[in-house]
Image (cartoon, helix red, strand yellow):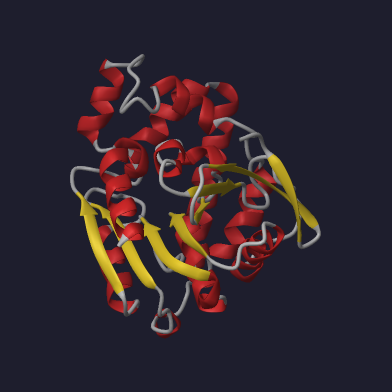
Amino acid sequence: MSESYADVNGIKICYEERGEGFPVLLVHGFTGNKEGWIGQWAPLSQYFRVIRFDNRNGGCSDRPNIPNTLDMLADDIRSLMKYLNLDKAHIIGWSMGGIIVQKFAIKYPERIEKLVLINTVMGAPSKQAVELLVKNSLDDLELRNKNKEEAFWTSARLGYHFKFRKEMEDNPNKKFYGLWSVQDLIDQQNINLFTSQDVINQSNALYPPLKYNKLKSIKNKTLLIASSHDRLTSKSAMIELNKAIPDSELKVIEMAGHSSPISRAPEVNRNIIDFLNE
């Protein structure tokens, strides 16, 4: 279960494996890291061979100073699969990871068994939206470097439903679902912290968004998991994805925000496991 490195498209991608069975790849989001799958890593590995990895310009993968594109990020997944001798896998993407996975499905449908897209969109609606995201991420980075705990609670206002946030505040030492504590999340958020240049390079892949008619070409069976109170990738955006992807079904996690794979891990995991085992 220790970290390994794959030579992928001229860079080294950091990855970990856990469990046995059919392979499942976990694709994280903007300025994230593979450890962000803290709610899925152990539970899914009871049923599958789970592989989580750091995207380029993130975590402990290489960080070339090159603007990212969706093609580049999708090709990294393809090359990682080739490195691991995987002909097919279930692919799960959360947030920006979901956008990357959509692009992967358009380019390499034959490499996917089933798709799971969690709290995601087709891409940024405008350059201005990307600029705002970059600004907010740079502000977040500055705060993390000053006060990691304050930075966590500031970001938690966006990621978690207020009732669950209150529960976390009232139980700072609780091991939620036997998976994580608040301190675990603070630590996870700051592993191999991203840089300002990483923010800029990653953000380049968010615009322009994927085209609706391109998503129509995705033929893989797809599960969409939305959250009722997601303030970053709205439920309405997930409904649009449901309309665009022909063989897709939509599940909504109620009373949850963008971080539902953490805050509502058991429900999210049950939906994923049931879908992949159908």
Residue ID at (67%, 49%): 57
Relative to 28, is 69 on the left or the right? right
Q: Where is residue 90 in the image (x, y as percent from the top left)?
A: 46, 61
Q: Can residue 143 be seen in this view?
A: no
Image quadrant containing the C terminus: bottom left
Q: Evaluate whether residue 58 shows in this view.
A: yes
Q: Where is residue 4 in the image (x, y as percent from the top left)?
A: 71, 42
Q: Position of residue 239 (x, y in %)?
A: 26, 68
Residue furthest to the right in view is: 10
View extreme (front): residue = 21
**Left of 96 or right of it: where is 203?**
right
Instruction: Decide: is 9 above or below 15.
Output: below
Residue 117: quarter of image? bottom left
- Quarter of the image with the N terminus is top right
For image coordinates 56% across by 48% down, the residue present is 51
Residue 259: x %, y % from top left: 36, 42
Residue drawn at (67%, 61%), measured in percent from left and top?
85
Q: Is residue 85 shown above or below 156? A: below
In this view, the residue in front, 265 or 190, is 265
Count how many numbered circles sit on residues in the image.
Answer: 0
Task: Residue at 32%, 46% (x, y): give it.
Answer: 269
**Foreground residue, 9 or 259?**
9
On the rendered structure, is 42 left or right of 187? left
Q: In which image quadrant can residue 77 be found? A: bottom right
Question: In front here: 233 or 272?
Answer: 272
